[in-house]
Amino acid sequence: SGINAEYGLASWELIEAYVTEMVDLAYASDEDVVKDEEIQNFAREIVEHGFRRFENGAGFPRSLPNKEKLAECLTAIIFNFSFYHASVNFQTFTYCFAPNVPTCMRMSPPAQDEVVTMDRILDTLPVAEIAFLGYNVAYNLGVFSPIERFFLGDSGEDKLGIIGENMAVAPEQEACIRKLTEGMRELKEKIDVRNVGRYLRYDLLSPDNVPLTTQT
């Protein structure tokens, strides 16, 4: 949806700014990126092992020639494992009502210009047991893991945020993390204002509902 795209783009820009600052702290020049064998091996392994069945490595570079490309790739990885994953995963139970998204069909779809009756619909939908299994799978896919950490914490809901008590980072890096957190807080406030008075709230991509990564 348009709202999904708007909040997705806003979160991408926040992550991109954060990653760019972190890369600048870690690498003084593009040459330092090229000489970093570990980060170069990381990129190559993604192409050769992660995307080996995709043509041209699904567009992911086999090597990282400069800081800009490194920041772009890291932004894409973080965004896909967090906001993008949340946008397609945590709403499954909301829309899994069997007539809306049936897990299977007991009859073929109606033919062109066929008169569709309520009996025809009921005979086509899955039986109750199969529908229940679909609900169960959707529910379990859409709940947060008990060990999740989120871009923003929420003590009222017992959610841990990105800021921890024992972060093993330099002061400059911690400043970047806190700047990201402040940006995420502003995004949440914007989403909260937009939801005022709405019967159906859209807070799927609110940073306090987006885990930092995908749990397996």
Image: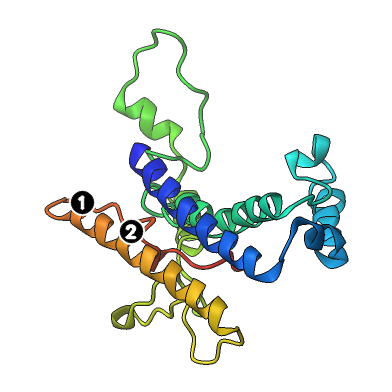
Depth order, front residue of 87/57: 57
Eyeballing the image, is 86 above or below 144? Answer: above
Distance, label 1 to label 2, CA atoms, is: 11 Å
Residue lying at the far front of the rendered structure: 28
Eyeballing the image, is 12 above or below 213? Answer: above
Mark 1 crowd level (few <14, some 14–19, many ≥20, 10 Å Cα): few
Residue at horizontal 49 percent and vertical 56 percent from the top: 83
Left or right relative to 176: residue 33: right
The mark found on residue 194 in the picture is 1
Q: Is residue 98 visible?
A: no
Residue lying at the far left of the rendered structure: 197
Three-letter amino acid code of the residue under disc 2: Leu
- Identify the element where label 1 is drawn: helix
Depth order, front residue of 179/198: 179
Residue at horizontal 45 percent and vertical 49 percent from the top: 131
Q: Quadrant of residue 59?
A: top right
Residue at horizontal 63 percent and vertical 64 percent from the top: 24
Q: Identify the residue under disc 2.
A: 187
Quarter of the figure with the N terminus: top left
Specify the color scheme: rainbow
Question: Where's residue 81, x and y in %?
Answer: 58, 58
Depth order, front residue of 82/183: 183
Left or right relative to 199: residue 164: right
Question: Where's residue 148, x and y in %?
Answer: 50, 75
- Identify the element where label 2 is drawn: helix
Q: Considering only order in the chain, which callout, 2 or 1, is on the residue closer to the N terminus?
A: 2
Question: Where's residue 192, x and y in %?
Answer: 23, 59
Q: Quadrant of residue 169?
A: bottom right
Quarter of the figure with the C terminus: bottom right
Labels 1, 2: front one: 2
Q: Is residue 168 visible?
A: yes
